[in-house]
Image: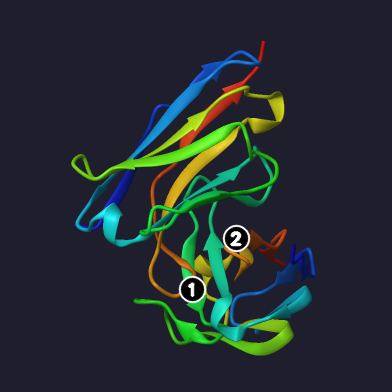
Amino acid sequence: EIVLTQSPGTLSLSPGERATLSCRASQRVSSSYLAWYQQKPGQAPRLLIYGASSRATGIPDRFSGSGSGTDFILTISRLEPEDFAVYYCQQYGSSRFTFGPGTKVDIK
Amino acid sequence: EVQLVETGGGLIQPGGSLRLSCAASGFTVSGNYMSWVRQAPGKGLEWVSVFYSGESTFYADSVKGRFTVSRDNSKNTLYLQMNSLRVEDTAVYYCARDGGAWAFDIWGQGTMVTVSS
């Protein structure tokens, strides 16, 4: 089973700053099978990025994804007030899905 | 409107059974890969099971042998039968659609399952 590790656990930033979130896999992940989600308290997760770098429908272009192999990055170019949330990476492999533990982006 | 609505959660004693439902609208469950994902209070997301359009199913090791996913195409509904429930199964259970890119593009609002004596 592929294990995903996310860092940092918490990222404290101010609106307007750049956020860089890391997702590392214990084995190689096909870029086609790596996704990122945003979750706010009391809400279901929302798909941001699929295929490592493709934005989902309606996602602003300040969100971007990159990476390959075992290391993937979610970048938020300029944080808006509504971006403070928890972010999860997710991979698919061997007919199963796994999520990372999440990175919380909070207001500094 | 494309949406998923889960129902069936509640308080159940350890060892008990519960069946969750996920009604889809705006698309067909039979034409999509559908998963259940859960989230324990204050914790992260955990994938639980998937029902592929070809009728094959897969489960997380933590629920294998206890949970069964099924669907009723005539009702456009996905189900999760949960048996031998444990305290650690306490969570919000979401159903989610795989949008064709091995990522979940549509989520329900979730239904809370509490396993406690």
Q: Which residue is mark 1?
A: A48
Q: Is residue A8 visible?
A: yes
Picture quarter containing residue B28?
bottom left
Picture quarter containing residue B16?
top right
Q: Callout 2: residue from which chain?
A: A
Mark 2: amino acid = Arg
Badge 1 and badge 2 in a common chain: yes
Mark 1: amino acid = Leu
User: Disc 1 on helix, strand or loop?
Assistant: strand
Q: Which residue is mark 2?
A: A96
The answer to whether residue A82 is above or below residue B67 is below
Q: Is residue A76 visible?
A: no
Count numbered badges in the picture.
2
Q: Callout 1: residue from which chain?
A: A
Give A61 or A5, whichever is nearer the viewer. A5
**In the image: residue A51, left or right of residue A29:** left
Taking the spot 47% from the left edge, 45% from the top edge, the residue there is: B94
Q: Position of residue B13 (x, y in %)?
A: 61, 13
- Which colour style is shown? rainbow
User: Disc 2 on helix, strand or loop?
Assistant: strand
Taking the spot 65% from the left edge, 37% from the top edge, the residue there is: B41
